[in-house]
Image (spheres, rainbow, N blue to C red):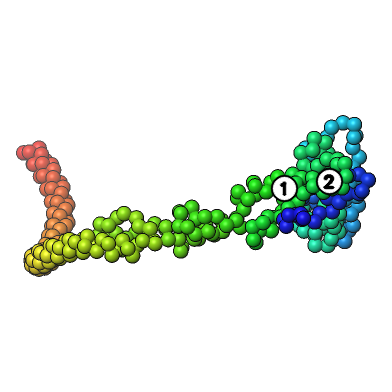
């Protein structure tokens, strides 16, 4: 009977007259189906405008999907073809639908993603049709048989036996909970990194855990998880496995007690040192307080002296102003007297001149 992991796939069916295996690599066909969906979504976005409705876009997608299928299925069977050629033709189709206004009305990447979701949700291009086309295209383009099988068999029994061991046989992962499916030849590769596979704990705790839960196990319940000893801060610095932590504490009780005594002695010494330091601070504080009081007294005396000096300065300023006023008055008096003296001198000069004239006339009369 076939293995339990063999999946039912329409691509594996054969007619009695062909006796030919037609298994296709599931991963490759799935990737091709995804590329087809993306190409049609891009083409719809390129061909749409701001006036396009959702209904018109879905209708356009149906026409474009038929056009894409028609173009991709037209191949020259006389020349070798590769899956890379298929990828290039799909890309060329999507690029050829670009218009002058493509990408100018918004983010094209977001619009394409939204269109892909709309195609899937509306079933405008059914997944079964995309997968059927993808399988057909893989068979058409994979001329070197890298992703599909075409072995011919002599009879049905031989064909059945081959299909059960064909490297492209679709199988599902045997690890409980894993939803992945792939070709038979990829089973070991998938198994080596499957997150649902049960594997021994890498810390050798003899537990079997799911690979995806390994980190949580090793930081949680793993008995080989390294932990700090409860007396780590006292000097027991060697990491201890969680499973033997209790045994370690019990076995090393004497050394842990010595660490406690040593730490207690350090604490007592530190307490004494702090007490001496506190007493010294209190003494220094008293001295500082006395110094501050003396400084306050000195400042008060200086402030009083400063007020006295300000008063004396005010009085001196007032006396200076009086002296200046007196001097200005004396200067005005001197100026007035000088004017009077000048006037008297002028009168005396006039009298002397008159006396001289009188004396001259007197002398002439004699």
> Within 10 Å of the Cα at label 1, are there few (<14), some (14-19), or many (20+) other Cα atoms?
many
Residue 257 in the image, given as x and y percentages of width and height:
21, 64
Residue 223 in the image, given as x and y percentages of width and height:
42, 61
Q: Residue at x 39, y 62 (%)?
A: 243
Q: Residue furthest top?
A: 79
Question: Is there CB contact under 8 Å for labels 1 and 2?
Answer: no
Residue closest to the eye, 323 or 131: 131
Q: What number of labels is visible?
A: 2
Q: Earlier in the sequence, mark 1 or mark 2?
A: 2
- 109 to 77, vertically: above or below: below
Q: Is residue 226 left or right of residue 76?
A: left
Q: Residue at x 10, y 66 (%)?
A: 279
Q: Quadrant of the C terminus?
A: top left
Q: Please tell me whether mark 1 sits on a helix, a strand or a loop.
A: helix
Residue closest to the eye, 305 or 218: 218
Residue 273 in view of the camera: yes
Residue closest to the eye, 108 or 346: 108
Q: Please tell me whether mark 2 sits on a helix, a strand or a loop.
A: helix
Residue 62 in the image, given as x and y percentages of width and height:
89, 54
Mark identifier at residue 159 = 2
Q: Residue furthest right?
A: 17
Q: Quadrant of residue 158?
A: top right
Q: CA distance from mark 1 to mark 2?
A: 16 Å
Q: Is residue 140 left or right of residue 317?
A: right
Residue closest to the eye, 66 or 279: 66
Q: Quadrant of residue 151?
A: top right
Q: Which residue is mark 1?
A: 184
């Amino acid at each position: 009977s076939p293995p339990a992991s063999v999946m039912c796939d329409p691509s594996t069916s054969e007619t009695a007259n062909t006796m030919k295996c037609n298994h296709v690599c599931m991963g490759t066909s799935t990737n091709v189906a995804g590329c087809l969906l993306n190409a049609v979504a891009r083409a719809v976005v390129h061909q749409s405008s701001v006036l396009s409705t959702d209904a018109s876009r879905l209708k356009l997608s149906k026409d474009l999907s038929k056009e894409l299928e028609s173009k991709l299925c037209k191949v020259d069977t006389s020349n070798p073809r590769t899956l890379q050629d298929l990828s290039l033709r799909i890309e060329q189709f999507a690029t050829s639908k670009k218009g002058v206004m493509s990408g100018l009305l918004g983010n094209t990447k977001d619009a394409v993603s939204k269109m892909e979701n709309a195609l899937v949700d509306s079933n405008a291009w059914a997944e079964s049709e995309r997968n059927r086309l993808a399988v057909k295209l893989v068979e058409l383009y994979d001329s070197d048989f890298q992703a599909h099988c075409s072995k011919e068999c002599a009879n049905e029994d031989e064909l059945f036996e081959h299909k059960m061991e064909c490297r492209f046989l679709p199988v599902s992962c045997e690890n409980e909970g894993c939803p992945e499916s792939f070709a038979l030849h990829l089973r070991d590769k998938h198994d080596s990194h499957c997150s649902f596979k049960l594997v021994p704990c890498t810390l050798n705790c003899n537990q079997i855990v799911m690979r995806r839960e390994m980190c949580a196990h090793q930081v949680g319940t793993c008995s080989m998880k390294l932990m700090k000893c409860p007396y780590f801060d006292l000097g027991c610095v060697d990491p201890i496995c969680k499973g033997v932590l209790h045994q370690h504490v019990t076995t090393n009780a004497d050394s842990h007690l010595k660490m406690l005594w040593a730490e207690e002695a350090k604490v007592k010494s530190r307490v004494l040192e702090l007490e001496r330091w506190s007493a010294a601070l209190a003494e220094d504080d008293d001295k500082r307080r006395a110094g501050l009081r003396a400084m306050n007294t000195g400042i008060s005396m200086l402030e009083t002296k400063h007020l006295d000096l300000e008063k004396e300065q005010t009085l001196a300023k007032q006396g200076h102003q009086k002296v200046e006023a007196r001097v200005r008055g004396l200067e005005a008096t001197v100026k007035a007297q000088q004017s009077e003296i000048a006037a008297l001198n002028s009168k005396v000069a006039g009298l002397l001149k008159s006396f001289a004239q009188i004396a001259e006339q007197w002398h002439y009369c004699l």
